[in-house]
Image: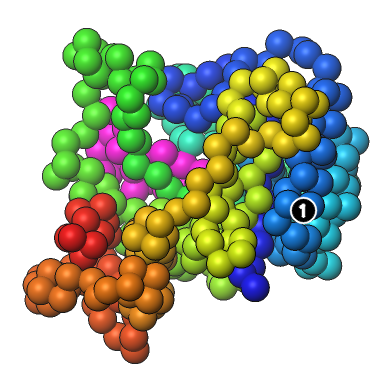
Amino acid sequence: MSKTGIYVHWPYCSAICPYCDFNVYRARGADNAPLLAAIAADLEAHAERFGRREALSLFLGGGTPSLVRGAEIEQLIAAAARAFGLRADCEITLEANPEDAHLFAEQAAAGVNRFSIGAQAFDDDALRALGRRHDKATALRAVEAADATGQRVSLDLIYAREGQSVEAWRGELSSALALPVEHVSLYQLTIEPGTAFARRVDRHQLAPPDDDLSAELYEATQEVCEAAGLSAYEISNHARFPAARSRHNAIYWNSDDWIGVGPGAHGRVTHEGARIALEAQHRPADYIDAVKENGIGWIVETRLTPQEAADEVLLMGLRADEGVELARVEALRGSPLNTEALSWLIGQDLVAHENGRIRLTRSGRLLTNKIVAELAS
């Protein structure tokens, strides 16, 4: 049976960031109890429908789940444990904003053993431009607070920001890697349709770096991380040692199973020989009502075709440093990948084929989506 993780989407934020296209809503002090109850019931419905399987990871994402007090975090963890069971060494991650650091101790006491801190930048001007509510000093204190709990600490940063130079990013990243963190997720700023940033770009009020500068920033990212002892094990993720790697994200990259609950959550479950894609009601009130009325929170349930399942395995697997098993992809497809394209990509040093696996080279990682499209054509 496939490895299984659980993703819980907490949709509320104290403010909506202008680059964010996630399913998020402004927190307005509403009672959390109805949503907590709906998530617990939805977890149970998933277990009844798809079978109980012990989870090796539980990821509390959002949104901003660090707004939730320790006692309610404990309720979410207990609900997951009742519905599925959690491995004794289950990785329990909380996505956290720096301004919620005063809650970290009680959240760790509730069972969180990995903090993923959304610092996004260690530059006050950049933080203001990104619409963040904290400053550099608050982000530094948050890392210290998370480290003081004795749990694992990961850091999220955004680069390729407007006006950012390679040299400035090198300095900022080097300073961040000197902090007590064992994992970093480093994302190039992407202008997503429908966001405030996309509207600013359309009005010529925002000018992100061009492709050449973005590539330089990516190369600088790899060099600084390698020099600091945090090797890349995925396109955007770096860890000091294997044990510090995100188990939950590895489930996505390996195309294993994950249960997705909470408003707008997505899931993938292998059931009765098929790969099932699930998507929950988006609006919190609709999600709560759906669970009350139907016993389940998901509104979309799709049986993926073999081609769709194979494409997901290929796209997600190539993100990881170890790549993907070629035979697995071709068995799902029921046909070989484009061998002519594969040979050309290998000749261009964009893809490597070793020991039955294909993986992207460092140069290839800048062209992931195009390479997947060529191989699957």
Residue at image coords 75%, 64%: 53
Residue at image coords 28%, 34%: 164
Please tell me whether mark 1 sits on a helix, a strand or a loop: helix
Asked whether 339 or 133 is in front, the reply is 339
Find residue 190 and report its image quarter: top left
Residue lying furthest bottom = 355
**Residue where numbered disc 1 is placed:** 47
- Residue type indicated by callout 1: Ala
Which residues lie in the magenta part?
155-179
In which quadrant of the rendered image does the N terminus lie? bottom right
Is there any visible trace of residue 267 in the rendered image?
yes
The image position of residue 341, as x and y in percent, is 12, 69
Tell whether 37 sits left or right of 347: right
The image position of residue 112, as x and y in percent, is 78, 49
Tell whether 305 sits left or right of 84: left
Asked whether 11 or 140 is in front, the reply is 11
When the figure is inspected, residue 362 is found, relative to residue 186, above or below; the finding is: below
The image position of residue 4, as x and y in percent, is 66, 62
When the figure is inspected, residue 289 is found, relative to residue 358, above or below; the finding is: above
Q: Is residue 110 magenta?
A: no
The image position of residue 24, as x and y in percent, is 57, 24
Residue at image coords 28%, 68%: 360
